[in-house]
Image (cartoon, grey):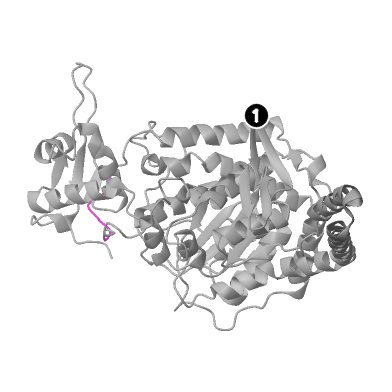
């Protein structure tokens, strides 16, 4: 089933397009006609790619597409929640061994932004329902063990209390011996633990309670929600100050100290926290202002999706989710989750040489794009974690494709290629999200260039002429114009002319020249193409 096509033209913020090859290896600009399209205002989104549903294993992809069709929502929402669901099932139970000592856990943080009225709750509920069914099974399976542990704990406490009473009332010559016995029984009672009631998913939960849940659940927990309230809580809604520790360490798998009342501190060696959140677009602007979110790297840990809303373009009589698709999804997800639930030591997933080559090629491309003039320069903190996220996604796709024995197989090139495709999707959306947060300096520079062009009244202008006319404070070097010119060209305000043929006489090459959009000049030119 093909997911529904999102509606066109919904403005969420600028995005700089990615280059498939080396950023420096630019092709010569194409020849142009005098026909111009209507330019896109700076700050409006260039079309973002749809979620690559085909990259998911069939049983997940078919469910994501079916849910998108029935709810008439972009498949981006279901795709991101679907990955978070797989992370809930597998997080803390597997790591991907990439190269040398580089290992990535397979838990993810995803967040999808859609305006109100887009049925976010329905999508989250449909895709997470099998997890809640598995949670009930785990509760039932552990009921006998928990009951026995509770009884043993009560008996131990009772024996310790009685021994303490005997010691307190004993004759002096017996008190020392009875006191020693009472202490031993009290220590035994203290060491008697009762397993917590199994829980896979939480909703809005404070950082302190989340740390406790992680400790109770063996270091694994997922926050899956159709509301963005968790970000308010992280920012300090109740405490007044941000508390990021559990989220930062829960994503990275770094050791976490959990302090609890009336109990000794507990150390979690490798916590695995999953987050799958659906929010309104305004939340991105709010969290960008929150103290500590960017500086401590929390924003860099999320995979962002910002699809177009389908409201106003929805099919009011959509196809319903086929029962066979829903059943296969529920059964396979249940099998995968239950199979990994009892694991204490994570499985180590290796890569075939071909899969490693695919990831290395993507790493090289990412590295180039983070150069000062590259499209990822202004989000390099996020981009630095991109290939690690791709390795995590590859691990999840691999385990989902082989729910029975994935831990015995290496990750193959096809799976890594699919994960890289998902990574490219999230990269394009991350650019749009961070631009909406105001992180792209190229946007401000592009507006400065556009403001000059609006007054210059030039049909054609060279890069050198622009540099001479603009502020040295904003453009210290000619190369500082490049991101702004790229952005203006992508939005249709300018287009580069083909360079003249070289004469072979040497010397400095001519400065690149740009045609300007007809609306920027008073000179008559051919009408715009509508």
Q: Position of residue 24 (x, y in %)?
A: 37, 31
Res 355 quadrant in image: top right
Q: Is residue 226 above or below residue 524?
A: below
The residue sitting at the top extreme is 505
- The residue segment tinted magenta is 32-38
The answer to whether 246 appears left or right of 491 in the picture is: right
Q: Main secondary structure of the magenta part?
A: loop
Q: Image point 21% across, 21% down: which residue?
A: 503
Q: Position of residue 362 (x, y in %)?
A: 54, 36
Res 288 quadrant in image: bottom left
Residue indicated by mark 1:
101
The answer to whether 190 appears left or right of 381 in the picture is: right
Evaluate whether residue 420 shows in this view.
Answer: yes
Q: Position of residue 122 (x, y in %)?
A: 60, 75
Q: Is residue 311 above or below residue 23?
A: below
Q: Identify which residue, 72 or 224, lies in the foreground.
A: 224
Q: Identify which residue, 513 or 133, lies in the foreground.
A: 133
The residue sitting at the front extreme is 172
Asked if the stretch drawn in magenta spans residue 122, the answer is no
């Amino acid at each position: 089933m093909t997911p529904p096509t999102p509606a066109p033209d919904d403005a969420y913020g600028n995005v700089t397009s990615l280059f498939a090859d080396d950023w420096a290896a630019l092709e010569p600009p194409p020849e142009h006609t005098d026909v111009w399209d209507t330019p896109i205002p700076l700050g409006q989104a260039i079309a973002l790619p749809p979620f690559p549903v085909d990259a998911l294993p069939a049983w997940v992809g078919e469910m994501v597409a079916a849910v998108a069709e029935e709810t008439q929502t972009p498949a981006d929402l279901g795709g991101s929640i679907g990955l978070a669901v797989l992370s809930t099932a597998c997080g803390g139970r597997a790591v991907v061994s990439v190269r040398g000592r580089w290992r990535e856990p397979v838990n993810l943080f995803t967040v999808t932004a859609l305006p109100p009225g887009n049925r976010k709750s329905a999508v989250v509920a449909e895709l997470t329902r099998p997890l809640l069914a598995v949670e009930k099974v785990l509760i039932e399976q552990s009921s006998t063990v928990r009951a026995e542990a509770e009884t043993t704990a009560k008996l131990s406490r009772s024996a310790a209390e009685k021994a303490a009473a005997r010691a307190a009332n004993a004759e002096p010559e017996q008190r020392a011996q009875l006191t020693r016995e009472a202490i031993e029984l009290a220590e035994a009672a203290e060491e008697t633990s009762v397993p917590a009631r199994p829980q896979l998913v939480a909703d809005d939960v404070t950082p302190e309670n989340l740390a406790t849940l992680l400790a109770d659940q063996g270091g694994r927990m997922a926050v899956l929600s159709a509301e963005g309230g968790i970000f308010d809580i992280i920012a300090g809604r109740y405490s007044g100050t941000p508390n990021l520790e559990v989220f930062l360490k829960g994503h990275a798998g770094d050791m976490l100290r959990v302090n609890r009342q009336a109990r000794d501190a507990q150390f979690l060696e490798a916590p695995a926290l999953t987050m799958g959140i659906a929010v309104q677009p305004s939340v991105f602007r709010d969290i960008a202002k929150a103290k500590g979110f960017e500086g401590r790297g929390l924003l860099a840990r999320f995979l962002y999706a910002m699809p177009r809303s389908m409201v106003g373009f929805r099919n009011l009589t959509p196809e319903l989710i086929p029962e066979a698709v829903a059943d296969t999804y529920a059964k396979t997800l249940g099998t995968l989750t239950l199979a990994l639930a009892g694991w204490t030591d994570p499985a180590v997933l290796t890569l075939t040489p071909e899969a490693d080559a695919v990831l290395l090629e993507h790493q090289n491309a990412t590295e180039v794009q983070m150069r000062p003039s590259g499209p990822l320069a202004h989000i390099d903190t996020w981009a630095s974690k991109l290939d690690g996220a791709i390795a995590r996604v590859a691990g999840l796709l691999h385990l989902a494709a082989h729910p029975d024995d994935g831990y015995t197989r290496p990750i193959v090139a096809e799976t890594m290629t699919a994960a890289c495709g998902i990574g490219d999707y999230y990269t394009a959306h991350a650019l749009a999200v961070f631009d909406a947060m105001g992180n792209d300096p190229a946007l401000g520079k592009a507006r400065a260039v556009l403001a000059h062009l609006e007054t210059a009244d030039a049909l054609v202008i060279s890069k050198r002429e622009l540099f001479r006319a603009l502020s040295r404070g904003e453009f210290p070097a000619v190369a500082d114009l490049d991101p702004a010119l790229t952005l203006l060209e992508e939005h249709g305000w300018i287009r580069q002319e083909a360079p003249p043929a070289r004469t072979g006489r040497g010397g400095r090459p001519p400065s690149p020249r740009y045609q300007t959009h007809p609306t920027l000049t008073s000179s008559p030119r051919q009408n715009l193409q509508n």
